Amino acid sequence: MQQTLQALYVASLHHSSYDELIPLLYRNGLSQDCNGWRDLFINHHDLPQPTAESQPYLKYLARYYPTITLELEEQMIVGLNSSTYWDVHYDSLWDAMKQYTHGDDSDSPGRRHSDTLGARWFASSWVPLDFAIHAVHALGVRQIGPLSLQSIALREPIAHRVVARIEQLRKINIDIGHSAYSQVLKRFAENEDNELLHELLHTDIHPDVFDDPPMLASIRDKALKEGAWETHRLLVAIQPAIVEESVDLTSNLLLQESVKYGQSRQALALLDDMRTMNIDVSMSTVQHICWSILDILPWNPKTTAVNQEALNTAIAYLTRLTLLKKPVHSHYWQKIIFGLGKFGRIGELEELCIGIIDTYEKLCISEGGLLPVHYLDAPPLGMDGSTNDVLVPADLPIAHEHHPSHGVYGFWLFSMEEVFHFGQPSFKIRL
């Protein structure tokens, strides 16, 4: 099939497919196919435009295969978010933006962002959207309001492109805020409900009104009486999205409190419920678990009942986070492996490590696409100091030295060698 499609591409006159096909294949975890198509595109001088469409794949290529030489156009795309790139252009960016900040002397980089001015900037058709986003980032904006998000979403044709823009903002540490409108917009986009998303973006109701439940109820009732069915349908549809957001927030807060006060039974049960109900475990909640449960776990525990219980609790949390696809640094798993070895639980150690790899393989098969890896377990990417999780394609070869399972699997093999080759593990490894 691939050979047939590539033959059709070569025979056609349309040679501007890089930014169409590469992102599509990569989103579905088909990086090996991306590699083949990239070679063909380059041979036909079909190179990416200076936008973020192909950036995830190119960053993956630069991070996991640094010996591959990128074309100049590709290198520029990899560096779109870097502070160095934007520092070079800072003066021109300021000149381009100052007309929107004139008259607001209190608004400086890093301070409060004018949502109205930001919306005008993002809505300007003469400014490429990628440029607009990175320019705002370079000027120090760290949060945008619902009007700005609406302007960005209006320039994207379908839901998954809106999700990609929100993710692009997140990766450069620009938050979309917690307004009801922004959360509903995000939910509709994530659910790929293009019809409702279109109605939300084109409604006459101002985004600020979505934070006023009595006003919304009044508009909904009036729409019903007057037969304004599109408006009524939209306002009915947003309620579950608002409730879902509230449930997500409340569940995470309850989980954090349970972890904080050592209520492991309740916390683990809540984690199971959140997985069943598909409620997202936030990054701050994962950090709470790491700080409260995993960081305090000793590397070389004394064989006491208290340490045994702490080890069991840590295993319970880690296995659940793995099933929830929430990556944690591999050194936490290494602590578990050391602990199981110290307590002589070799059978459980082997079962756990094989189970981790088996779970990863099942996720690759069932989910496909991209799977998250903790940023400390991924190879570095130049001067990129981001602490966001790294997404890798499901088809990353397991033989690759930076495959996510190696941090655990390699350590397990080393520990087993300590046990069976030398008789007793020394547990004095420098980490």
Image (spheres, rainbow, N blue to C red):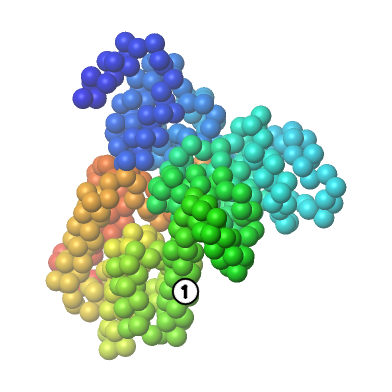
Kindly give the residue lying farthest to the front in the view shown. Answer: 226
Viewport quadrant of the N terminus: top left
How far across and how far down the image is residue 148, in percent?
63, 48
With respect to residue 423, does 168 lie above or below? above
On the picture, is 419 further left or further right than 32? left
Q: Is residue 138 visible?
A: no
How far across and how far down the image is residue 404, in percent?
31, 52
Q: Is residue 23 visible?
A: yes
Q: Residue at x 24, y 74 (%)?
A: 340
With respect to residue 149, does 355 lie above or below? below
Q: Residue at x 33, y 67 (%)?
A: 277
Q: Residues within 10 Å of mark 1 (few under 14, many from 20)?
A: few
How far across and how far down the image is residue 364, in percent?
25, 49
Disc 1 secondary structure class = helix
How far across and how far down the image is residue 168, in percent?
52, 45
On the picture, is 234 further left or further right than 341? right
Q: Residue at x 31, y 26 (%)?
A: 36
Q: Which residue is mark 1?
A: 250
Q: Looking at this view, is 200 or 184 the one in front?
A: 200
On the picture, is 144 further left or further right than 75? right
Q: How many marks?
A: 1
